[in-house]
Structure formats: structure tokens, C-alpha cells
Image (tube, grey):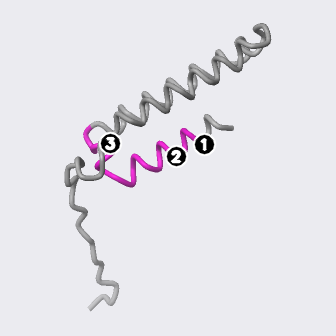
Amino acid sequence: MGIINSFITTTQVSFTDDRIFPSEKRNTSVGTCGMIARSITIVAPIVNEWAAPWPIMVLFAFSFIGYLTSFTFPKEDEFSNGEKIKEIKYDITAK
């Protein structure tokens, strides 16, 4: 469930804010995140069969890696401006 939520959140954020994933790198970024998430999902049943402390240690290790990775994100004032989105107005009055 957590991996699915992570995948949905990553996809949603990547298409909402151009500062996080620039448009020219967006598909590669989302694809890479999906590939890593599915790879970890395949290995999860194997890790679950290990002796008692190891599965929870693996979980803590991945959580800690994710926590450390969050410090590599740019701060709010370090973002580039991103792309300006032009508003499209349609004339539906058919005059």
C-alpha cells in the first residue's frame, strides 16, 4: 500500500510542479521511480521470509535512506522559476 501511495504521489507531484521534475526530464524520472518501486516489491516476499530482526531492519534502512534523500532536495529559494503556463481561453459563443 505504501509503494502504491508513493507512486501516485510522485506522479501527481511531477505533473503539478515543474520545479521538481522539469518537463524535459519528467517521463524518465517517473519511469525510474516506478521501476525501482516495482523492483523492491518483487523482493519484499523474499525479505519477509528472513529471520526475525532482518525484515524490520531492511524496512528501517530504506526509511532512513529516504529520510537522508529528502535533504538533497532544493530549498524553496533555490528553485528555478520553471515554465510559465499560458492560460487558454476558448470562445464558445460562436459569433
Residue tagged by mark 3? 21
Query: x, y (%) of residue 45?
Result: 73, 16
Residue tagged by mark 2? 9
- In front of the other: 63 or 87: 63
User: Is label 2 in contact with label 1 (beta carbons under 8 Å)?
Assistant: yes
- In front of the other: 60 or 44: 60
Q: Quadrant of the C terminus?
A: bottom left
Q: Residues within 10 Å of mark 3 (few under 14, many from 20)?
A: some
Which range is magenta?
5-24
The picture quadrant where one finds residue 20 is top left
Cα gap from disc 2 to disc 1, whole angstroms: 6 Å
Query: x, y (%) of residue 4?
Result: 62, 38
Cα gap from disc 2 to disc 3, whole angstroms: 13 Å
Query: x, y (%) of residue 53?
Result: 74, 13
Number of the label disc, if any, that sits on residue 5: 1
Q: Quadrant of the N terminus?
A: top right
Q: State whether residue 9 is above or below residue 72.
A: below
- Secondary structure beneath dot 2 equals helix
Disc 2 marks a residue whose amino acid type is Thr
Assign the magenta stretch its main secondary structure.
Answer: helix
Q: Is residue 19 magenta?
A: yes
Asked whether, in this view, residue 3 is left or right of residue 91, the answer is right
Q: State whether residue 39 is above or below residue 4.
A: above
